[in-house]
Image (cartoon, rainbow, N blue to C red):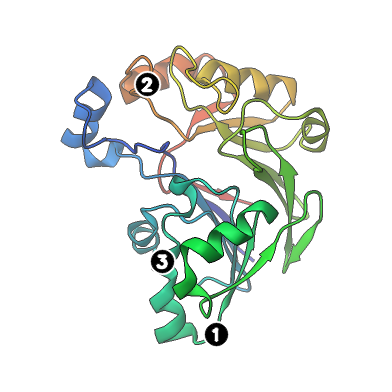
Amino acid sequence: MERNFILLGTGAGPGLPSFFCDCVACQEARNNPRLSRTRSGAFVGDENKKILIDASPDLRSQLIREKISEIDCMFLTHWHYDHFGGLGEIEYFVKLKRRRPILAYLPPSAVQEFEDAFPNLADVLEVKPWEFERQYHLGGFRLTPLPANHGIETAGFLVESELTRIAYFPDTAGLPEATGRNVYEVDWLICDATFHGENWFPHSHMSIEQAIDLGRSTQAQKTVLTHLAIHYSQPVTESQLTEKVARFGNVIVAYDGMRIKF
């Protein structure tokens, strides 16, 4: 059975290009839309189970691009706009096609915020708080929320099949010690690499260098850099960034639509 982990978006909050920015990275993405980055999110699925991780403001275009027409349930890493702003895109899928609510697992601290922000989605999403370190069995794979360092209550997700372990942490500043142990020697560490150059928010995010170091410390087989804002703080083109990480044989720069079979 084919099972895929798909990176729907690989950009940080401003996206790439940003409407307000004219740096070399944004100019490159305007000239070559293939190099654009929508806001971060992921999709995990096989023919039996289809799971959405985060709902970025770009969700509609992401699902269309990847030809995804079904969602069985969803998990949110945390309650920041670039990760929940697309929740409203689910409404018409539920009302016009699915005709029953989608189970949505949110951070416990975000449940009330969801109810306040989206009262019109009460009959669209069946909201439940996820639990740290609980294994959610979803058909042929497992998903486990693990604590991340991001200022507010935030999870990354360990996704496991019988053969492969994938750790997805799009927003984190390093990892708590216990989480690091849980993801030790994963096959794929997909992690926050928001900043190229100086890390403006060291308690919430990582730089590219810090993400690479995290991959080393966890002994990940492959480290995938995501949640990239490559116009901050030192703008860099795609080719420059790719060249920079090429000397690390197990480091990959993520791109929108990247698929990992597991």
Q: Assess disc 1: are there few (<14), some (14-19) or many (≥20) residues with their C-alpha within 10 Å of its C-alpha.
A: some
Q: Quadrant of residue 91?
A: bottom left
Q: Single out the mark in the foreground, 3 or 2.
A: 3
Q: Secondary structure at mark 3?
A: helix
- In the picture of the structure, the residue carrying the numbered disc 3 is 88
**Real-space CA distance between mark 3 and mark 1, rounded to the nearest whole angstrom:** 15 Å
The count of marks equals 3
Q: Which mark is residue 100?
A: 1
Q: Can I make out residue 17 in this image?
A: yes
Q: Which mark is residue 232?
A: 2
Residue 150 x, y percent position in the rendering: 61, 34
In the drawing, does residue 86 fall left or right of residue 175? left
Q: Which mark is residue 90?
A: none
Q: Earlier in the sequence, mark 3 or mark 1?
A: 3
Residue 90 x, y percent position in the rendering: 44, 70
Q: Secondary structure at mark 1?
A: loop
Q: Nearer the viewer, residue 49 or 205?
A: 205
Instruction: Give the residue at x 21% y 37%.
Output: 19
Q: Earlier in the sequence, mark 1 or mark 2?
A: 1
Three-letter code, disc 3: Gly
Q: Secondary structure at mark 2?
A: loop
Residue 139 x, y percent position in the rendering: 72, 69
